[in-house]
Image (cartoon, helix red, strand yellow):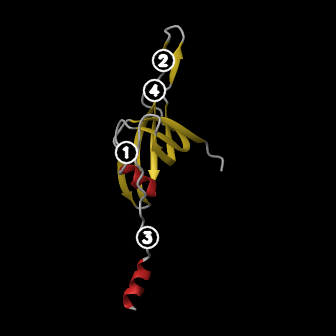
Amino acid sequence: MYDTQVTLVGCVATQIDYKETANGPAARFRFAVTPRYFDRRKDAWTDGTTSFYTVWARRGLAVNLAGSVSVGEPLVVHGRLRVREDPPDGEGNRWFSAEIDATAIGHDLNRGTAAFRRVVRTDTPLMVTQKAAVV
């Protein structure tokens, strides 16, 4: 209810790491977001500092992500932001990482085209098919 929802526009930085887990399919990848701004002194567009996020997708989103996305492709990612603090290392440095639990992911159509294909699910319970075969 009080989650921080974010929408990021950037590019896929790593291959999709897809796994079947006890809780269902899961996929993750690193996402690079580089802001651009117009530098009036240079009279040109300039890239800002790139931020990297780990994006997590679960269940059907994970399956569709693994079959649709490759490294370097521009995406729009929407989901819940989580910031983790890792324990200090031996030198006392504190590390923070930002992760996105994605609820929606799509190609950025400002930078290219995409062809959507609807996935046909066959989630018929096993008991129904067995009863139909017996009758």
From the viewer's perspective, is 26 left or right of 84? Answer: left
Q: How far apart are marks 3 and 4 (CA)?
A: 41 Å
Q: Which amino acid does label 1 sit on?
A: Val
To which residue does mark 3 refer? 123
Q: Distance between the residues labelled 2 and 1?
A: 28 Å
Q: Earlier in the sequence, mark 2 or mark 1?
A: 2
Circle 2 packing at 10 Å, graded few (<14), some (14-19), many (20+), is few
Q: What residue type is labelled 2?
A: Trp
- Disc 3 to disc 1: CB gap under 8 Å: no
Q: Residue at x 50, y 26 (%)?
A: 35
Circle 4 or circle 2, nearest the eye: 2
To which residue does mark 2 refer? 45
Circle 4 or circle 1, nearest the eye: 1
Q: Earlier in the sequence, mark 4 or mark 1?
A: 4
Q: What residue type is labelled 3?
A: Asp
To which residue does mark 1 refer? 69
From the viewer's perspective, is 1 left or right of 83? Answer: right
Q: What residue type is labelled 4?
A: Thr
To which residue does mark 4 refer? 50
The x and y percentages for residue 124 are 43, 74
Circle 3 or circle 2, nearest the eye: 2
Circle 3 or circle 4, nearest the eye: 3
The x and y percentages for residue 112 are 41, 37
* Image: 16 above or below 64: above
Q: Which of marks 3 and 4 is nearer the N terminus?
A: 4
Judging from the image, what secondary structure is the residue with disc 1 in?
Answer: loop
Q: Distance between the residues labelled 4 and 2?
A: 15 Å
Q: Distance between the residues labelled 4 and 1?
A: 20 Å
Residue found at the very far right of the displayed protein: 2
Q: Which residue is drawn at 37% across and 45% down?
A: 69
Circle 1 packing at 10 Å, graded few (<14), some (14-19), many (20+), is some
